[in-house]
Image (cartoon, helix red, strand yellow):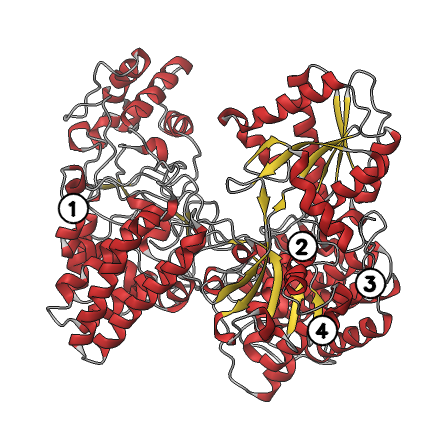
């Protein structure tokens, strides 16, 4: 669920330099999303709770972007990071990062990318979008670009992402799911590529006026990942404590962690599809 | 069920005509202050202090606590302060508009200069959040321009490029495209929001200057200022209907069911209330209250507002900024007279007063009033085992509460030799049905007579904070303190604690909030209620009552479709849209007098309703 907001929010965040990972503690790297000022407050709450539960000092800091988070994991400035599926498989490839937990939304640890159109557009198939305009969220968004675009590739309508401009009238990156969806709903473009539930970012009236044209395979949801050298006991303890966020008495804390419905233990196998897609789109060799 | 649904939807547009209230994305401080300025500047009299506060402090609905004026440059701020000082409405409009427009242009310029760096995206986003202050008016007044500008923002975002993920998948920025799109937007903003001279505006609104000068009539959507909240209370009160608790089905009581529908229908109101989707139930959630209802400028605090101001019905504007706390309607049939000042002796007259005078609706028909009265007369209090039928504490009450009961019934010189119970009569549901001047308001002029207020019931008051007619006291303990101080009751700390414990005992109620779990979702409640409303067609169609059928369908069909947005079972959403369309077809046929077709569509509706019922959660 990486989008341009991630990218731009980073620029205005107050960056806190990480302390060297405490010998007996944990340091968490957070990637800014909507509101970096809120994130700083959230980190304080969540690391305070984690420290209490784990009995070791837990600290957190905001990274500039995914690359900085991965760099922090590489050099030991961070032990744990929160990360989308695509940057995770890159981090796994580059330094052997390990997935610990997956976020759960609406009962699922995964989501899809969809292509949405207005019901009154007369568009019935992906092929109907030839010569028409489409808005995606962001060039590096899994569900807001890569997976919806892959639907066109799999249909044989385009050869690859670079070929998109020969198919569409015009392809835009609107800056986020909501912007892409609004552009479609308001008739600025004919279609939007965005995450499975991006229609919920529209007004209820707009929601009744649009439909799903196509849906991608499932994408593993955001993960909580660890650097490879993190001591096994700490890793297990951290995972246990994080899973206890699913307990009713702790659920309020999820709002301080990007707001998932809960977590499950990560299964490295579920990323195979992402690895394969990343290879096809040149993110991985 | 209007506004039951505080959904997860985050809307980028101002709160405007929607069948379902939605959460609004926070505004940039300058954009929020600007929209507050327009809303407040159109009130009469103009609340100048509130306008100033929206620029100089944290403003409701803003994403950040920063004072909006701190983001203006010195010249812009000076013009704003000058307008505020001399209370010049037109100058204020101009200064505020310039602050937003210039701010937007500066951010665009910064984005251009930093293209290829992450800062460009930040600056562009800031410019776009300021554009939002004008966007709805541009769309209403100048659709081609709104479209062209919308495309320009898409081009700007697309031209930013991307750093990729961990160095992979990056894209170059496109300077030429960015510059062109920036010019399109900047030229429009300069021409329409930074003219050499602004024309004088009777109504403050972000209508583009060129459109305004053309004399073209512009129908702007009714909007509320940022920070408004007309969605239902997040903890939805539990509704106790007498017939329902006694085992009767509402579908068998068509008059009550129709009244229930009207209680949730904005169609009976007029003006901005109707357009904004405000209904009786917006403030009186499930017969109780909505402690979160808030409209900046009209509400001093959440849970009420000035109902006789300039916004909803200018004819009824008393030109006094007098916030009223929303009273609960639980047990309303037992608590006459009505209105905080007890001005209406009957429910029928009071309901008519709300529809016509407060919210500018048309005169309701006798049938509609009958239906509304029939419905609200069914509201009962939450059961409370701590009191018996005579309002005496039972064994379930605490010792402290029992001590408090004695204090409540004791006579005090400060109460003219009476007791709390003299007015809050326990065996009359803790009210005497009268009005009293207890010193909670000031006379309108020296030597004048202060307003007397009706004695409120104390049943279920644990869930209706804040207290007093204006909601000025936050807790029951503070109410006890207020009486102790103003009436010199002489209660020590322990006695005050006991009296508070007593109030909390008689004010309690079982299961005060609706519980949602699994398939018993918010949508399920809405589904059951809306289909019950629709069931009145079984009575209205044979009666060939086209007028009330139209009102019913204009309320229920859009609500069904809109409420689909909060379904847990999102996969079943398209079925709701289909069902809503069938209901529309009933209304279309009925309005054309094609009763055979109306009956046929209604049968299709009922068949589909039964077929999809299990998936409706």
Q: Distance between the Cα atoms at labels 4 and 1?
A: 56 Å
Look at 15% across and 62% down and name the residue there. Answer: B538
Q: Distance between the Cα atoms at labels 2 and 1?
A: 50 Å
Circles 2 and 1, Cβ within 8 Å, touching? The answer is: no
Circles 3 and 2, Cβ within 8 Å, touching? The answer is: no
**B60 sits to left or right of B424:** right
Circles 4 and 1, Cβ within 8 Å, touching? The answer is: no
Relative to residue B135, is residue B59 depicted above or below?
A: above
Instruction: Specify whether residue A99 is in view.
Output: yes
Residue indicated by mark 2? B29
State which chain disc 1 sits on: B
Residue B62 on image: x %, y %: 63, 51
Given this view, does label 2 or label 4 mark the residue nearer the observer?
A: 4
Specify the label residue B249 is tagged with: 1
Q: Distance between the Cα atoms at labels 3 and 1?
A: 62 Å
Specify the label residue B152 is tagged with: 4
Relative to residue B251, is residue A80 depicted above or below?
A: above
State which chain disc 4 sits on: B
Instruction: Classify 10 Å Cα crowding around label 3: few (below 14), some (14-19), many (20 and above).
Output: many
Q: Distance between the Cα atoms at labels 3 and 2?
A: 19 Å
**Residue located farthest toward the left when viewing the structure as drawn:** B543
> Regarding mark 3 in the picture, which secondary structure is present there?
helix
> Nearer the N terminus, badge 2 or badge 4?
2
**Residue located farthest toward the top when viewing the structure as drawn:** B399
């Amino acid at each position: 669920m990486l989008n341009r907001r991630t990218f731009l929010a980073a620029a205005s965040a107050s960056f806190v330099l990480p302390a060297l990972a405490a010998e007996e503690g944990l340091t968490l790297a957070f990637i800014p999303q909507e509101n970096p000022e809120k994130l700083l407050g959230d980190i304080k709450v969540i690391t305070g709770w984690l420290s209490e539960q784990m009995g070791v000092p837990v600290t957190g800091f905001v990274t500039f972007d995914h690359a900085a988070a991965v760099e922090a994991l590489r050099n030991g400035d961070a032990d744990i990071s929160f990360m989308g599926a695509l940057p995770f498989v890159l981090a796994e490839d580059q330094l052997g990062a390990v997935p610990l937990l997956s976020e759960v939304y609406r009962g699922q640890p995964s989501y899809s990318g969809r292509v949405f159109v207005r019901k009154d557009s007369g568009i019935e198939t992906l092929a109907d979008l030839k010569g028409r305009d489409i808005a995606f969220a962001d060039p590096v968004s899994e569900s807001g670009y890569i997976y919806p675009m892959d639907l066109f590739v799999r249909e044989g309508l385009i050869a690859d992402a670079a070929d998109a401009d020969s198919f569409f009238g015009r392809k835009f990156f609107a800056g986020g799911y909501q912007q892409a969806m609004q552009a479609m709903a308001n008739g600025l473009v004919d279609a939007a590529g965005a995450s499975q539930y991006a229609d919920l970012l529209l007004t209820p009236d707009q929601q009744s006026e649009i439909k799903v044209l196509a849906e991608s395979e499932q994408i593993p949801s955001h993960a909580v990942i660890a650097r490879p050298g993190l001591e096994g006991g700490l890793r297990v303890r951290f995972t246990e404590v994080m899973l206890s966020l699913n307990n009713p008495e702790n659920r309020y804390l999820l709002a301080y962690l990007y707001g998932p419905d809960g977590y499950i233990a990560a299964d490295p196998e579920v990323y195979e599809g992402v690895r394969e897609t990343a290879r096809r789109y040149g993110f991985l060799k | 069920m209007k506004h039951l649904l505080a959904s997860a939807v985050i809307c980028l547009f101002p709160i405007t005509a929607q069948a379902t209230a939605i959460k609004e994305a926070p505004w940039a401080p300058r954009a929020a202050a600007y929209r507050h300025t327009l809303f407040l500047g159109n009130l009469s009299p103009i609340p100048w202090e509130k306008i100033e506060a929206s620029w100089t402090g944290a403003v409701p609905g803003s994403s950040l606590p920063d004072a909006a004026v701190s983001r203006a440059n010195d010249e812009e701020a000076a013009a704003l302060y000058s307008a505020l000082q001399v209370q010049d409405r037109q100058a204020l409009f101009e200064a505020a508009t310039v602050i937003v427009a210039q701010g937007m242009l500066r951010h665009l310029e910064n984005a251009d200069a930093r293209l290829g760096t992450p800062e460009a995206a930040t600056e562009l986003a800031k410019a776009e959040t300021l554009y939002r202050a004008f966007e709805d008016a541009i769309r209403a007044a100048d659709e081609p321009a709104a479209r062209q500008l919308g495309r320009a923002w898409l081009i700007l975002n697309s031209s930013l490029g991307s750093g990729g993920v961990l160095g992979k998948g990056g894209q170059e920025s496109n300077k030429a495209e960015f510059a062109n799109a920036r010019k399109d937007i900047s030229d429009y903003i300069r021409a329409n929001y930074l003219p050499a001279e602004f024309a004088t505006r009777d109504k403050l609104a972000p209508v583009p200057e060129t459109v305004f000068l053309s004399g073209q009539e512009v129908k702007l959507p009714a909007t509320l200022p940022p920070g408004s909240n007309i969605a239902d209370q997040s903890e939805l009160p539990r509704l106790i209907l007498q017939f329902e608790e006694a085992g009767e089905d509402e579908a068998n009581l068509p008059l009550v069911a129709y009244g229930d529908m009207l209680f949730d229908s904005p169609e009976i109101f007029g003006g901005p209330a109707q357009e904004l989707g405000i209904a009786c139930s917006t403030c009186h959630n499930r017969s109780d209250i909505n402690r979160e209802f808030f409209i900046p400028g009209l509400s001093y605090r959440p849970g009420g507002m000035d109902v006789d101001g300039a916004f909803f019905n200018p004819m009824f504007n008393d030109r006094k900024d007098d916030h009223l706390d929303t009273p609960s309607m639980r047990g309303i049939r037992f608590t006459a007279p009505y209105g905080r000042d007890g001005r209406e002796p009957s429910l029928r007259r009071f309901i008519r007063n709300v529809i016509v005078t407060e919210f500018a609706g048309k005169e309701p028909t006798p049938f509609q009033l009958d239906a509304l009265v029939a419905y609200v007369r069914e509201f009962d209090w939450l059961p409370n085992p701590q009191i018996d039928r005579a309002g005496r504490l039972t064994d379930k009450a605490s010792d402290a509460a029992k001590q408090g009961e004695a204090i409540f019934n004791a006579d005090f010189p400060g109460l003219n030799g009476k007791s709390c119970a003299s007015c809050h009569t326990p065996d009359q549901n803790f009210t005497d049905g009268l009005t009293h001047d207890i010193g909670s308001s000031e006379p309108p002029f020296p030597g004048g007579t202060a307003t007397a207020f009706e004695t409120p019931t104390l049943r279920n008051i644990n869930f209706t904070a804040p207290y007093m007619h204006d909601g000025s006291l936050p807790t029951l303990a503070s109410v006890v303190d207020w009486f102790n101080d103003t009436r010199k009751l002489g209660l020590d700390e322990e006695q005050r604690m006991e009296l508070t414990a007593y109030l909390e005992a008689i004010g309690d109620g079982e299961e005060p909030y609706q519980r949602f779990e699994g398939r018993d979702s918010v949508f399920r409640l809405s589904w059951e209620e809306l289909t019950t409303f629709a069931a009145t067609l079984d009575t209205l169609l044979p009666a060939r009552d086209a007028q009330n059928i139209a009102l019913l369908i204009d309320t229920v069909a859009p609500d069904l479709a809109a409420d689909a947005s909060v379904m847990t079972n999102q996969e079943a959403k398209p079925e709701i849209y289909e069902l809503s369309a069938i209901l529309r077809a009933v209304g279309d046929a009925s309005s054309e007098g094609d009763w055979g077709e109306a009956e046929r569509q209604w049968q299709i509706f009922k068949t589909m309703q039964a077929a999809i019922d299990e998936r409706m959660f």
